[in-house]
Image (spheres, grey):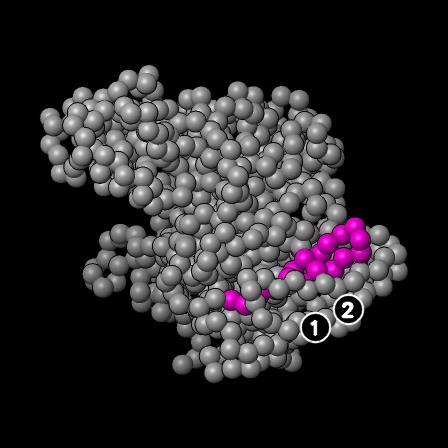
Amino acid sequence: MEKLPANSFCLLSCVLVLFLSSVSAVADDPQDKHEVYIVYMESLPSGLEYSPMSHHMSILQEITGESLIDGRLMRSYKRSFNGFAARLSESERERIAEMEGVVSVFRSKKLQIQTTASWDFMGLKEGKNTKRNLAVESDTIIGLIDTGIWPESESFSDKGFGPPPKKWKGVCSGGKNFTCNNKLIGARDYTGEGTRDNQGHGTHTSSTAAGNAVAGASFFGIGNGTARGGVPAARIASYKVCTGTECGSEAVLSAFDDAIADGVDLISVSLGGDDGEVLRYEEDTIAIGAFHAMAKGILTVNSAGNSGPDPNTVGSVAPWILAVAASTTNREFLTKVVLQNSKTLSGRSVNAFDLKGKNYPLIYGDYIEGSQVKGKILVSGYSVSSDVAVATIIRDYKDYASISSRPLSALSPDDFEFLVSYVNSTKSTQGTVLKTEAVFNQKAPKVVSFSSRGPNIIAVDLLKPDITAPGVEILAAYSPLGSPTEDIDQRHVKYSVLTGTSMSCPHVTGVAAYIKTFHPDWSPSVIQSAIMTTAWSINASDIGVASTEFAYGAGHVDPIAALNPGLVYELDKADHITFLCGLNYTSKTLRLITGEAVTCTGNTLPRNLNYPSMSAKLSKTNSSFTISFNRTVTNVGTPTSTYKSQIVLNHGTKLSVKVSPDVLFMKSVNEKQSFTVTVSGSNIDPKLPSSASSIWSDGTHKVRSPIVVYTDIPDSI
């Protein structure tokens, strides 16, 4: 069939149509209901005579046969890339799919949010205890694509701030009664609700990345201290794309379009796919938007997902995105249960209720009437709190604490079974539940159970997640309109405790911004490399695939070391296109991601992308194997330096790893040198990755990259 021309302005045009959530519309034919689609087009023509909005409207008018299409056109992408979102029937979608330049039509998914001692834990101390370049930090702008922000929070006060940076091109369109300032310099809304945060998630992530230092912050006294972001002097721009816990793909793409054009330096996205679903790059609006950001020199940091500990669940899998897992800090919240015999059991919850140490009768049962538990403490195997009982003690398998709307402690299975046995064997058992206290966690950092794990199912030779950072029991600013819990909770707070890769993501965004204040000219890939190659190595705390590099990537972020990495692995747009070509992407599909016509030449293996980690999936039939990784490093350290190679085998791995050359002689800054890592072995464990670390050291710097080799990893553990 002959394809219809979209418009003469489509010079190298391609159109991407993403199928989104259903939107009810009046239609004569019930099979012809209107749905929401994104039409993503190639780069904007440079001619002044081109009007994106007019072009988009003319396409809709042609397809629909309607002269008035105000109710059809939902969004127009016209600043950083070209396209629009519109309501179309199935037959209209089919006609657009047949237009010249249309590349693909596919289903998109709704995204979900992935929910201060942490900065001290990482070594980024408060005030003058940390080296800062405040003039440049104040010129740094972080764009957060999230649920909005609470502008009146003290974390976003502009006291002591000068005017916004001259490079800022954004606006303050926050809606009714919403005011920006010299700290919160921009706000945009894509939901129709205004940019004000109604639930707290976006306020929390924004203050974690770049909030002011606010003394005396706590959740009803729990975690009391100074709440602050990684770069308190930086500016914030808020892009609200979520209502409730759902975030439309068309809104996310609009936010990227605006943030890039507004002049942000970094983009933080604590959003991801639903229930561990992993999207191909051409179907993933975060990956598409981040590709355009990368091409303009903007690093995107994204949460890895909350679908762990099962393997194959990491949702952020593009090499041009820094994907962040979640791990613990050296502070944890415990809620003690004290029995009348003084036996103490330590449970998990963020319990702000104080029973004043008074003992109450304990009653065990899963199906107990309200009158039976009144005036008593309910011991229940179900993870729910009683609205009638004085307090509830439950059994829980979680390795983190959540806020409770009623007095509650969640015991480990062993402690819970002990308590049940004690209650059943002792007459008139009494006890109490104490208010939560913060205690020292000597096992940190440890990747939390829910954090999504690799391997990467889209690009199997690319290790994801990239890094881990604090994401457990994080205290930060909150919206007074949001409930502190998922239950009915009448409390309203200015600071709250949240857990998730949503919380670890802005920590790494703050670190990236901190690095950029000392190295404003560093590209996204250089910043990402600096973060990954200087990370703390993490020793496996448990057995099994969930405690390997598939959990934490290169390790735990180290902000101070990342300022001076010594050597870096550089990548640019062309390298990423070569990587996609190596995945056998067609030119047609490549245009979906890049927004331009691309012709693949040669055959470069994806594992030879110049990435700071090295990973390869082997065929099941390979009993013996030899694979190689080609890499090039750039010297950003001492002009004259000699780096020697060292290999450290991990997890009892029996691999043979050789590096050639094994010595690099650098004579100047920005000098590049290449090397090859050859890995061989046989009969590796099919349930676990075999891994090692490649380290380049000049006596001052240690440039470490994980090496991971694996076969098919089962989907569950």
Q: Secondary structure at mark 2?
A: loop
Q: Residue 514 vs residue 556: left or right? A: right
Q: Secondary structure at mark 1?
A: strand
Residue 245, can we see it? yes
Residue 206, can we see it? no
Q: Quadrant of the C terminus?
A: bottom left
Using the image as rendered, state which of residue 420 and residue 107 is in the foreground. Answer: 420
Q: Residue at x 67, y 55 (%)?
A: 533
Q: Residue 160 vs residue 191: left or right? A: right
**Image coordinates for residue 120, horizontal then vertical, percent:** 61, 34
Q: Residue 94 vs residue 324: left or right? A: left
- Against 418, residue 647 (above or below) is below
**Image coordinates for residue 301, horizontal then vertical, percent:** 56, 49
**Image coordinates for residue 463, horizontal then vertical, percent:** 55, 63
Which secondary structure is most common in the magenta stretch? strand
Q: Estimate how packed mark 1 is, as few (under 14), some (14 to 19) or many (20 or more) residues with alpha carbons within 10 Å.
A: some
- Against 664, residue 497 (above or below) is above
Give the amino acid type for the residue marked by disc 1 in the picture.
Lys
Magenta segment includes 360: no
Mark linked to residue 662 = 2
Q: Which residue is mark 1?
A: 658
Q: Residue 111 vs residue 183: left or right? A: left
Using the image as rendered, state which of residue 28 and residue 262 is in the foreground. Answer: 262
Picture quadrant where residue 375 is located: top left
**Image coordinates for residue 482, horizontal then vertical, percent:** 37, 31
- Against 557, residue 335 (above or below) is above
Q: Which region shows up in magenta?
A: 689-705
Q: Are marks 1 and 2 in contact (CB under 8 Å)?
A: yes
Q: Quadrant of the N terminus?
A: bottom left
Q: CA distance from mark 1 to mark 2?
A: 8 Å
Using the image as rendered, state which of residue 236 and residue 389 is in the foreground. Answer: 389
